[in-house]
Image: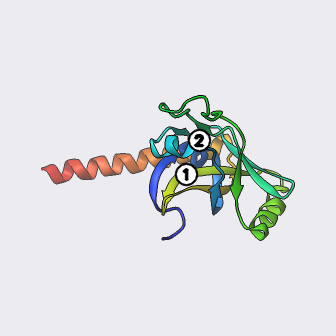
Amino acid sequence: MPKGTGKLISNNKKAYHDYFIEETYESGIVLQGTEIKSIRAGKVNLKDSYARIQNGEMYLYSMHISPYEQGNRHNHEPERPRKLLLHKREIDKLFGETKEQGYALVPLKVYLKNGFAKVLIGLGKGKKQYDKREDLKKKEAKREIERAFRDRQKM
């Protein structure tokens, strides 16, 4: 299966709005107990989450996984840091690239692939305000063209 494919659980639309995504990496994620059950139920929020490299390991912060409803006292903490599983050479490469000014590691998707939860991490360069406005104008123009084309075909 190609990178980034599988049963989509959560998508981070805000990351595409705030960053130019230059490269993507597929990583596994270390979960506790009932977290995988909550992920399979779709109770994941990637908004405002980010990845950071510490001591040669990559961690994902601020990703909210809601507590499992049928879980008991062994339920997990919703916003704990979660370790991401990548090859050492990929982590070293990302560490060097994120040292440059304006680059960040942002999670783009959470999906299930062959029964395992995966996170698609993007190396993004922050957009300026005028870049965001330009993207919105392009999106609106494309929508207008499609609307006009659709109305024309109805006649």
Tag 1 near tag 2, CB within 8 Å? yes
| Residue at disc 2, secondary structure | loop
Residue 42 drawn at (x, y percent): 46, 42
Label 1 crowd (10 A; few <14 / some 14-19 / many >=20): many
In three-dimensional space, the C-alpha distance between marks 1 and 2, rounded to whole angstroms, equals 8 Å
Residue 133 shows in the view: no
User: Label 2 sits on what residue type?
Assistant: Leu
Residue 96 drawn at (x, y percent): 84, 62
Residue 102 drawn at (x, y percent): 78, 50
| Residue at disc 1, secondary structure | strand
Q: Please, is residue 31 above or below residue 1 in the view?
A: above
Q: Residue at x 55, y 51 (%)?
A: 109
Residue 95 drawn at (x, y percent): 82, 60
55 relative position to 138: left or right: right
Label 2 crowd (10 A; few <14 / some 14-19 / many >=20): many
Residue 79 shows in the view: yes
Q: Residue at x 51, y 54 (%)?
A: 111
- Lower sequence index among marks 1 and 2: 2
Q: Please, is residue 123 above or below residue 137 in the view?
A: below
Q: What residue does disc 2 label?
A: 46
78 relative position to 135: left or right: right
Q: In the rendering, which numbered label is found on residue 109?
A: 1
User: Label 1 sits on what residue type?
Assistant: Lys
Q: Residue at x 27, y 48 (%)?
A: 148
